[in-house]
Image: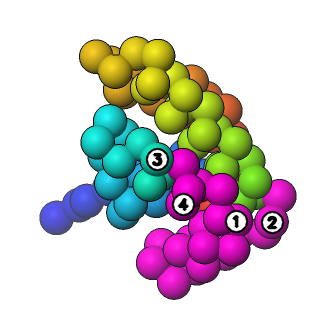
Amino acid sequence: MSFHLERRTLYTLLRDYMAHYGQLINNNEQLRVALTNIEELIDFALYKADIAIDVDAAKRVSQVGLAWLDYVKRHPERPDGYAATAKAELESTVIP
């Protein structure tokens, strides 16, 4: 039997963090507050996702997440429309 574990990147961290705090459309402001809390993002990565990130990585995740929320405000009919851009921006960083 074989199974595939998803590669952990800053994008998968962002996706999991946002899912933890709510939906893109219904919880936009709650997500915005969560994404600006760098210490909470680092703690979530360590204690919920079992990965260690530094402040610079957390700031990158925050910045991309906030851009995603801005996109959703402009395009509420396509909340996942920014996913490919977010993935491209954060996917280059693989977390061991």
Q: Is residue 9 visible?
A: no
Q: Nearer the viewer, residue 89 or 17?
A: 17
Residue 53 shown in magenta: yes
Inspect the image, locate mark 2, and give the three-letter code of the amino acid beneath it.
Val
In the picture of the structure, the residue carrying the numbered disc 2 is 55
* Residue ID at (69%, 74%): 39
In-image side of 52 versus 54 (left or right)? left
Q: Earlier in the sequence, mark 2 or mark 3?
A: 3
User: Image quarter for residue 91?
Assistant: top right
Q: Dot 4 corresponds to which residue?
A: 34
- Circles 2 and 4: CB distance less than 8 Å? no
At x 60%, y 79%, the residue is 43
Which SS does the magenta portion mostly show? helix
Q: In terms of secondary structure, where does tag 2 sit? A: helix
Q: How crowded is the residue under tag 4: few (<14 C-alpha within 10 Å), some, or many (20+)?
A: many
Which residue is labeled 3 in the image?
Answer: 29
Label 1 residue SS:
helix
Q: Which mark is residue 74?
A: none
Count of numbered marks: 4
- Is disc 4 in contact with disc 3, using a CB cutoff of under 8 Å? no
Mark 1 — residue? Answer: 38
Q: Is 59 left or right of 9, judged from the image as shown?
A: right
Give the residue type at disc 4: Ala
In space, the residues marked 3 and 1 are separated at their CA atoms by 16 Å
> Is residue 51 part of the magenta span, yes or no?
yes
Three-letter residue code for mark 3: Glu
User: 10 Å neighbourhood of mark 3: few (<14), some, or many (≥20)?
Assistant: few
Residue 77 image point, x, y percent: 28, 16
Q: Nearer the viewer, mark 2 or mark 1?
A: 1
Q: For the magenta stretch, what is the residue range? A: 32-56
Type of amino acid at the residue the image marks with label 1: Ile
Is there a contact, CB below 8 Å, between mark 3 and mark 1? Answer: no
